[in-house]
Image: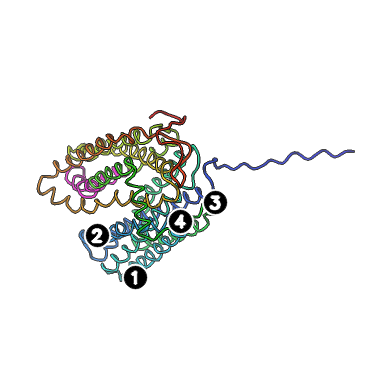
Amino acid sequence: MTRAAPPPRRTRRSRRPDWAGRNYSLLTASAFVTNLGSNGALIAAAFAVLEAGGDGGDVGLVAASRTLPLVLFLLIGGAVADRLPRHRVMVAANALNCVSQAVFAALVLTGEARLWQMMLLTALGGTGQAFFSPAAEGMLLSSVRGEQAGRAFAVFRMAMQGAAVGGAALGGAMVAALGPGWVLAADAAAFAVAGSMRALLDVSGVARRAPGGGMLSDLREGWREFVGRPWLWGVVVQFSVANAVVAAADAVYGPLVARDHLGGAGPWGVALGFFGAGTVAGALLMTRWQPRRLLLAGTLCVFPLALPSAALAVPVPVGALCAVMFLTGVTLEVFGVSWMTALHQEIPEDKLSRVSAYDWFGSIAMVPLATAIAGPAETAFGRTPALWGCAALIVVVTAAVLCVPDVRNLRRRSKPVTSGGTGTPAGTETPAEGIG
């Protein structure tokens, strides 16, 4: 009696799409973890200051303590990330954030936190972020290949935005139930977990960078790369203004309008939640839509960023404000994915972190100034004219950047440029889904 042949063994198929390689998956998962913890920690830090006897001014000092070193060290962080292995810079920055948050949590839990200590620890966190952000963006952009880069960035941003919404909600609930100290401790643990994941990144396929002539030489080289592309510096200048006025509207005028006309902090928090939900929806949209004219589609979607300021100036009812915030979140995420895709395909891999640092620097440099003068502007002109001014500035700078030919004409390509800056010309079009 002959024995039947055994059935053929089934090979296990990876459930990950082709563009979601090992490094990309590790970067996305670790970013989700840290974003979940950090958004809760922002709420916890503010309540830690208040529980220690501080007031609104003290909360602002602690927040500024994070922003100042972030602005000061961003460019150095970009140069370091292009000089050293990026994953090591990321892990070191995560370690600094982990330690600073752990000490912050211990001080709060023991009731020994002083204002100067909270400012110092928050400044250390901002320093870590200054070195981490350019390295992380460079690592992410170099981890994706081929025509599906836009889809990969959309999924990454969807994870980030989902974590932001969930982290803020979870952090607020934990602060109410357990106190801010335990939320800060959870954030420290999140940094430890994420840093461990990032230590597993495989950089064997990343080409070694030729040693430069020093830090200043690296910064000058990154600057030349930045200013040599009108679409790049044009959009960064646009967002240096747009981010500043949005920060003033959201951080200063929004809560005041909510207090006087919308029913208090609750409705304002709901409106911000709708904005977060819109960003998730926008990222989901960009997993399916790949506009050919990247920056034209993205820049046109920046115009709705003026709508929240206009809605607060009227002011509209809470329901209408929530709808406006959701739409703004969707359209802003269209720009975000398009921008990352443009950087990926146009900037040489060995300069990604330095260019990213100039991008970050330009985008946040004016935020502290705008939030500082928002109050005096309200006193001088009135809240409603100040809000209309915010909306008008966004429209003006967005219309101005559309005058740059490369912004209107830059098309999607499947192959990024090489380190020597060669490759398919920026205006060459390759077939892609959707229209731009």
Relative vertical location of residue 185 with respect to residue 394 in this rendering, above or below: below
Q: Residue at x 17, y 37 (%)?
A: 314
Quick one: 91 or 117, which is closer to the camera?
Answer: 91
Q: Looking at the image, tell me whether mark 2 or mark 4 is earlier in sequence order.
A: 2
Residue type at mark 3?
Gly
Which residues lie in the magenta part?
247-274
Q: Looking at the image, tell me whether mark 3 or mark 1 is earlier in sequence order.
A: 1
Q: Secondary structure at mark 2?
A: helix
Considering the image in quadrants, where does the N terminus appear?
top right
Can see residue 190? no
Which one is in front in this view, the residue at disc 1 or the one at disc 4?
Answer: 4
- Residue extending farthest to the top is 435
Q: Which residue is mark 4?
A: 86
Residue 205: image tag: 3
Q: Looking at the image, tell me whether mark 2 or mark 1 is earlier in sequence order.
A: 2
Instruction: State how far apart marks 2 and 1 are (Cα).
Output: 20 Å
Whether pointer 3 and pointer 1 mark residues with C-beta atoms closer than 8 Å, the reply is no
Q: Which residue is mark 2?
A: 59
Q: Secondary structure at mark 1?
A: helix
